[in-house]
Amino acid sequence: MAPRLKSPKPPQRTGTSLPPSSRSGKTTQEPLHFAKEEKPVQSNSSTTSFSSQTSPPSPPSTPSMMKKSAADFFPVASTITTLTAITSYIGFFAILWFTWLQVVLYDVRFGCDSLFERLCKLVHFGTMVTFAIIGTRFDPSRPHETYITMRQLSMVLIVSRVVLICQYGSVMWWVRKHERITTPLSVHIVSFAIGAMLCLGFFFAFTEQSSGQGYVVWYVIIAVEALVVFVSSSQWSAVSFGHTNLDERFGLLTLIILGEGIIVLTKSMNYITKGENFTPGIIAQIISAVLII
């Protein structure tokens, strides 16, 4: 009589053991339970997609949009009804525009995608946000009340120039063996360094007892800096604007300003008229606003 062979034992499983129903090979209703539990997950996903559609759009992140927002914040937060207010707005916009211009003049020629460049852009965005905050209190006609604001604006200009020095310095380090490129970059860096030191000097000049006329130096600084960059770029072809998209940048900015100006004009006209018929005075205001835009 042949010996009876023993069936091999199944390998032992470590961890959680299977339920008895799964061992016998019979199907269970557990998959159905899991299918039923997926329904609230699907409804939850649909709710999430609906909330994402109804959520407000993210704020603009380009330098042009950020500059536009900072410039528009001035008339929204403060009323422009006098000649002094108009002069303050023009002066504030000039400082803001030339600061944005220097960032663009660097970006169209040497901008690249790197961690260093992103950090520098982050600082530039921070300066634009600070401009928007300071713009509500910018009033050179009251130096004894706004000298702290003038100090803050001087510090913002210093930070902007220091970041530009770092950016041009990094480019000069990579092309240090090419004298035809390092020479104009050195001129750029020296002009920004002198501007930063002058702003630092006038930071301490703004006091409660000062006359408050030191802000005029800001306009001299930003004009000379822009002149130095354009002249040096025209003299050295290695850093010229010949093959850049500078004209496209200015064209897009012009469209943004015109579009925003028309929107503000429409809101203002609706507020002034308030459902009234057109009168010669209202028509003259509309024509004047269109000519300004």
Image (cartoon, rainbow, N blue to C red):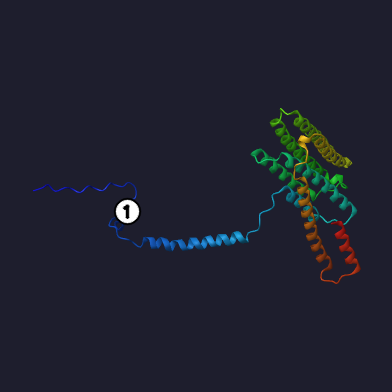
Q: Is any atom of residue 65 visible in this view?
A: yes
Pinpoint residue 248: horizontal percent, then vertical percent: 76, 48
State how many labels appear. Answer: 1
Q: Nearer the viewer, residue 24 or 203?
A: 24
Q: Residue 244's quadrant in the figure?
A: top right
- The three-letter code of the residue at mark 1 reads Leu
In this rendering, is residue 164 above or below 177?
below
Pinpoint residue 43: horizontal percent, then vertical percent: 51, 63
Pinpoint residue 205: horizontal percent, then vertical percent: 84, 37
Q: Residue 168's quadrant in the figure?
A: top right
Q: Residue furthest left?
A: 1
Pinpoint residue 161: horizontal percent, then vertical percent: 77, 38
User: Which residue sits at x=78%, y=47%?
Assistant: 247
Q: Nearer the viewer, residue 190 or 228?
A: 228
Task: Judge from the rendering whether residue 271 lies leftward or rightward of residue 31; answer left or right.
Answer: right
Quadrant including the C terminus? bottom right
Task: Judge from the rendering whether residue 116 lies leftward or rightward of residue 245; answer left or right.
Answer: left
Q: Is any atom of residue 208 visible in this view?
A: no
Describe the element under mark 1 as helix, strand or loop.
Answer: loop
- What residue is disc 1 on? 18
Q: Nearer the viewer, residue 271 or 205?
A: 271
User: Which residue sits at x=48%, y=62%?
Assistant: 40
Q: Nearer the viewer, residue 286 or 106?
A: 106
**Callout 1 environment at 10 Å: few (<14), some (14 to 19), or many (20+)?**
few
In this rendering, is residue 161 above or below 65?
above
Q: Residue 209's quadrant in the figure?
A: top right
